[in-house]
Amino acid sequence: MNPVRSILPGTRASVSGHVASMPTSKIGEVANLGRGDPDIIPLWFGEGDLVTPPFVVEAAEKALREGKTFYTWQRGIPELREAIAAYQSRLYGISCAADRVTVTGSGMQAILLACQLLCDAGDNVVAISPVWPNIGAAVEVTRASMKPVTLDRSPDGRFSLDLEKVYAAVDDRTRAIFVNSPGNPTGWMMTGEQQKALLDFARARGIWIMADEVYARLVYNQPYAPSFLEHAAPDDPLIVLQSFSKPWAMTGWRLGWMTTPHAFGEEIAKLVQFNLSGSPEFVQYGGLAAIEKGEAFVGQMVDRCRAGGELVYQRLSALSRVKVARPEAAFYAFFSVDGIEDSLAFASRLVTDYKVGIAPGVAFGAGGEGNFRLCFASGAERLSKAMDRIEAGIKAN
């Protein structure tokens, strides 16, 4: 049964009851407390303090000046799709054809397109949790539901996955298993052996794997994170979701991609047409420059985040009430503080009283409450100043 339609305040008009019943982002609630305040150090969102590198900006600017401002290929310009396919083939030692690649208007849109492609009302998606809140929202937009499977956590703060819990959560209405690895907010990273096992399970059950691998290059003890693409055949039930945002500092560009079986290209093209009608061509030329010329910058980003993660880890682990693991991947510290259970209230207090912003763990669903996510993709001076404020807030609580 659909929720009752809701009348918007100050109008006589109603909106979909389904949309009206969806919760707002708890991260956004905290951020809205401090937007526009130049004294706040904002570590609540998943982005650092580096601007997009000049070679990407120059490529997009050149495309603008050449008049690349019209409608274009719904699945992306051929040059970019071919470059992405070659990049994935080179990175993972596989053969990935360009006809499996679709360029999307952000990694978030890739997730939403995947949900629209697979889910009907009443279906469900099993998701490893804690997880970025937009995942559940994308599932719910399609009138499906999300079934979280919570990561286990050891006394030292490290996360691990029990695959048997995932298998047990799958039922007759499960359409997909959503895996974000490396994980946001936890930094947890799935092993190649677990990926193989989960892919075998998905094949046997006739369900899909949606693999969010946006943080695949932000790994600190190996060149890249294990990918489902390394174990899958081209026609396997696998959708890999990616973004330019993190490794190339392009969060505001809203450009991503998805890798699917070739047979789904026509259906995805329809969905792109109905959602966005294709990503801007000049933006895609920026993405092309990132893919083709950006390896050195990715290395700089990894080094910067490794240093930031170690700084934050050392500061947090020195506090007796804090439980945190040394980051292995992604660019977040996900930590708990003994005696602080209401993460939204404390994160809000840090903004208003201590001028520093972090994300409340409650935003990330099952297994999240009582924790906090801090993005450490910033320089040492900024992070040190932020940690002074966070430490003061913890000690005063």
Image (tube, rainbow, N blue to C red):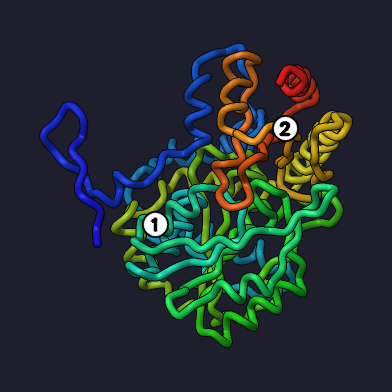
Q: Amino acid at mark 1?
A: Glu
Q: Is residue 212 visible?
A: yes
Which of pointers 2 and 1 lies earlier in the amino acid sequence?
1
Residue 91 locus on image (x, y percent): 73, 63
| SS assignment at label 2 | loop
- Given contact means CB atoms under 8 Å apart, are the residues at marks 2 and 1 in contact? no
Which residue is at the front of the view, 87 or 243?
243
Q: Is residue 380 above or below residue 184?
A: above
Q: Position of residue 13 (x, y in %)?
A: 13, 38
Q: Which mark is residue 140?
A: 1
Say which mark, if any, is on residue 339: 2
Local packing at callout 1 (Cα closer than 10 Å; few below 14, some 14-19, many 20+) is: many
Kindly give the residue lying farthest to the left in the view shown: 12
Seen at 63% across and 30% down, the residue is 358
In the picture, measured across the screen, residue 40 lies left or right of residue 314, that is left
* Residue drawn at x 60%, y 66% as measured from the top left: 85
Callout 2 environment at 10 Å: few (<14), some (14 to 19), or many (20+)? few
Residue, x 72% and y 30% (percent of image)? Answer: 378
Number of marks in the image? 2
- CA distance for labels 2 and 1: 33 Å
In the picture, the disc for residue 123 is none
- What x and y, as percent, mark residue 208? 52, 75
Left/right of residue 70 with respect to residue 393 in the rendered view: left
